[in-house]
Image (cartoon, helix red, strand yellow):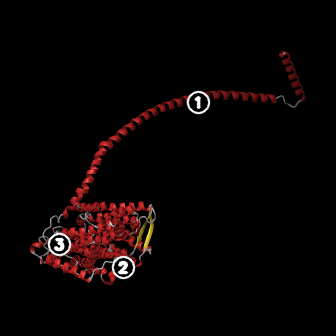
């Protein structure tokens, strides 16, 4: 069944890469192809959730590229694929400049999220984490000709990348503790690491997850991410990157519990974010900024669920929030495209103008508020029940976050049903030129997502909730009385704010997100820049001079070697000349000897020829010759004596 996982991830990755590379050549059919691919991904994800395939391939020393569909990922896979399909359907209906590049990046982003959901090892998780971060930067800054949007993408990228260093720390701790064993980086075995390494791994994963989930102190980046297209916001901040931070903590919940301190740290970080970002959401005057702050606040409940051991409640809340928030972001995008504004004051009466869109938006907002029987009412209360069993102060803090959720939800919905005022229309087209229309194909995905926001809370109620809790090993279950009290509390907060027309007293620092980005610059960016400048000055004052001095010595030595080389060259030339002269003289002597040998040979040949002349064969000639030899010998004998 591993082919299901290959198809699930390979299909959007290959199609996305092809669209991104082809560019304008395929703009005409890019949106249609993207929607078809996402429909196939949704079907494949549903099949994978039922069949539970797994895949392991060699990747790094001591770690495999492991993917698997287990009880937790089986719940999230269809939700992620379904939201992605509906968001891309909305994007195709709305139209966007350079569609091939946009849909290509979205498909690559979706593929990385699917790897994150199914990853079983830190190496596979890191691989997907990196691609997800890079794709989010490209999508937030998609309109790259506008410097503000590019800067916002860079801010989001740097903030999350800073937190991502924790994941590398965790991987290093796992490798060091496992001594390069095959299962050293398995997510399922991190809780069994030896003491110090386990704590380091837990700390690293906690920081990385808080950064991706826009939890304190990293929450500010999600405000800047609102400069991306509305479809990007709908996917990025509902079922994709932000959700993956909370999902990772649910995945490694045994590790958090094994350390003791990490579970409490996660729970309190989530509760604090739910409260503080709830205050920030109430103070916003821009609909997308309000939704951004509420995203971080709602993810706080998921992080809190991981800390208190309520994996079922956290997973259900993650799924319900994905449907709810994607519907809200798409509705905000539809109004922005139609009216040219997303300012709350200028959206007065927008629900009356487009009743179907206003109705879907209202259902999703009431779910966000925790109004019965909608989704986030049940899932949020389930987490609060688990928090109460863990720590009563934690429960009170989470309950305060739930109250604030009802308040900012009421503020978001109150104005859209008010009668349109003449001065309201003067606020149109303040951000872009509006089309004054919402197409049916834009309404379809928003309506489907709103329906999901209404019913997905059943995951923690009744028989379905018992099944989910049994599979994920969670025991928390809200009683009917707790559910009723939670719903009444939400209604008690929402009704007065709605009646007041969404008017909430201004909160100091809310519009500026408590200056968190500025604080990050002061605490982190400025010290890093100051350190970089100090290192640069040190480099100029010390290292550069040392290098120059060393270079001068090397140059002096090179010159000395050059002079030595010149002397060697002169000696070599002189030796070569002497050898040449000696060779010339040797050639003359050789010529003289050769001449003498040649003359001797000629004399011998002549003597031999003369010696053959007396040999005539005549007997009297031989007698004469013998007599001559005897006479000569006698003469010599006489002379010698």
Q: Is residue 195 above or below residue 44?
A: above
Q: Where is residue 464 in the image (x, y as percent from the top left)?
A: 33, 82
Q: Do the residues labelled 1 and 3 touch (CB within 8 Å)?
A: no
Q: Are marks 1 and 2 in contact (CB under 8 Å)?
A: no
Report which quarter residue 611 is drawn in: top right
Report which quarter residue 327 is drawn in: bottom left
Question: Which quarter of the rendering shows the C terminus?
Answer: top right
Q: Position of residue 419 (x, y in %)?
A: 12, 78
- Please tell me which of labels 1 and 3 falls first in the chain: 3
Residue 583 disc label:
1
Real-space Cα distance between discs 1 and 2?
Answer: 103 Å
Packing grade of label 3 (10 A; few <14, some 14-19, many >=20) is many
Q: Where is residue 83 in the image (x, y as percent from the top left)?
A: 30, 75
Secondary structure under tag 1 reads: helix
Question: Which quarter of the rendering shows the N terminus?
Answer: bottom left
Of 541 and 316, nearer the camera is 316
Q: Do the residues labelled 2 and 3 touch (CB within 8 Å)?
A: no
Of 171 and 266, nearer the camera is 266
Secondary structure under tag 2 reads: helix
Mark 3 = which residue?
A: 339
Q: Is residue 341 left or right of residue 625?
A: left
Packing grade of label 1 (10 A; few <14, some 14-19, many >=20) is few
Mark 2 = which residue?
A: 470
Write the residue at 70% across / 29% down.
597
- Please tell me which of labels 1 and 2 falls first in the chain: 2
């Amino acid at each position: 069944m591993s082919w299901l996982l290959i198809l699930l991830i390979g299909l959007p990755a290959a199609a996305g890469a092809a669209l991104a590379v082809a560019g304008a050549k395929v703009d005409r059919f890019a949106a249609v192809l993207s929607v078809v691919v996402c429909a196939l991904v949704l079907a494949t994800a549903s099949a994978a959730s039922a069949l539970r395939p797994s895949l392991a391939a060699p990747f790094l020393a001591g770690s495999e590229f492991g993917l698997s569909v287990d009880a937790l990922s089986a719940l999230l896979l269809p939700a992620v694929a379904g939201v992605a399909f509906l968001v891309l359907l909305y994007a195709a209906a709305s139209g966007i400049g350079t569609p091939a590049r946009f849909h290509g990046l979205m498909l690559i982003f979706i593929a990385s999220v699917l790897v994150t959901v199914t990853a079983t090892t830190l190496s596979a998780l890191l691989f997907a984490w990196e691609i997800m971060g890079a794709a989010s930067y490209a999508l937030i800054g998609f309109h790259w000709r506008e410097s503000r949007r590019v800067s916002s993408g860079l801010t989001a990228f740097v903030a999350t990348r800073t937190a991502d260093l924790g994941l590398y720390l965790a991987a290093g701790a796992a490798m060091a503790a496992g001594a390069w064993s095959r299962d050293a980086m398995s997510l399922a075995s991190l809780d069994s690491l030896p003491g110090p390494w386990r704590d380091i791994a837990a700390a690293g994963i906690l920081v990385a997850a808080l950064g991706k989930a826009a939890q304190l102190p990293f929450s500010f980046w999600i405000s800047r991410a609102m400069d991306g297209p509305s479809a990007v916001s709908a996917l990025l901040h509902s079922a994709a990157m932000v959700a993956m931070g909370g999902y990772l903590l649910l995945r490694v919940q045994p590790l958090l519990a094994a350390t003791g301190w990490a579970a409490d740290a996660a729970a309190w970080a989530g509760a604090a974010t739910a409260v503080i970002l709830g205050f920030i959401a109430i103070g916003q005057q821009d609909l997308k900024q309000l939704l951004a702050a509420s995203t971080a606040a709602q993810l706080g409940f998921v992080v809190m669920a991981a800390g208190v051991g309520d994996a079922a409640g956290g997973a259900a809340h993650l799924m319900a929030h994905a449907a709810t928030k994607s519907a809200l972001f798409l509705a905000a995008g539809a109004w922005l495209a139609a009216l040219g504004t997303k300012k709350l004051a200028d959206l007065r009466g927008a629900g009356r103008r487009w009743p179907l869109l206003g109705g879907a938006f209202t259902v999703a907002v009431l779910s966000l508020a925790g109004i019965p029987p909608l989704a986030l009412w049940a899932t949020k209360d389930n987490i609060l029940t688990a928090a109460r069993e863990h720590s009563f102060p934690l429960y009170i803090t989470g309950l305060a976050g739930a109250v604030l959720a009802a308040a900012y939800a009421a503020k978001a919905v109150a104005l859209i049903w008010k009668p349109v005022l003449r001065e309201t229309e003067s606020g149109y087209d303040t951000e872009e030129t509006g089309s004054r229309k919402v197409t049916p194909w834009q309404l379809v995905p928003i309506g489907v997502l709103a329906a999901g926001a209404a019913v997905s809370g059943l995951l923690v109620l009744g028989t379905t909730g018992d099944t989910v809790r049994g599979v994920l090993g969670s025991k928390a279950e809200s009683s009917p009385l707790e559910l009723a009290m939670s719903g009444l509390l939400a209604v008690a907060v929402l009704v007065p704010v709605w009646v007041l027309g969404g008017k909430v007293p201004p909160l100091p620092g809310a519009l500026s997100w408590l200056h968190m980005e500025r604080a990050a610059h002061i605490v982190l960016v400025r010290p890093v820049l100051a350190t970089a400048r100090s290192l640069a000055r040190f480099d100029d004052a010390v290292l550069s001079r040392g290098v120059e001095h060393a270079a001068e010595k090397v140059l002096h030595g090179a010159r000395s070697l050059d002079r030595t080389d010149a002397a060697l060259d002169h000696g070599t030339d002189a030796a070569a000349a002497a050898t040449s002269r000696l060779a010339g003289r040797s050639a003359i002597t050789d010529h003289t000897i050769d001449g003498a040998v040649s003359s001797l040979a000629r004399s011998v040949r002549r003597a031999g020829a003369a010696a053959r002349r007396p040999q005539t064969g005549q007997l009297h000639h031989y007698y004469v010759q013998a007599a001559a030899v005897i006479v000569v010998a006698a003469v010599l004998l006489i002379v010698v004596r």
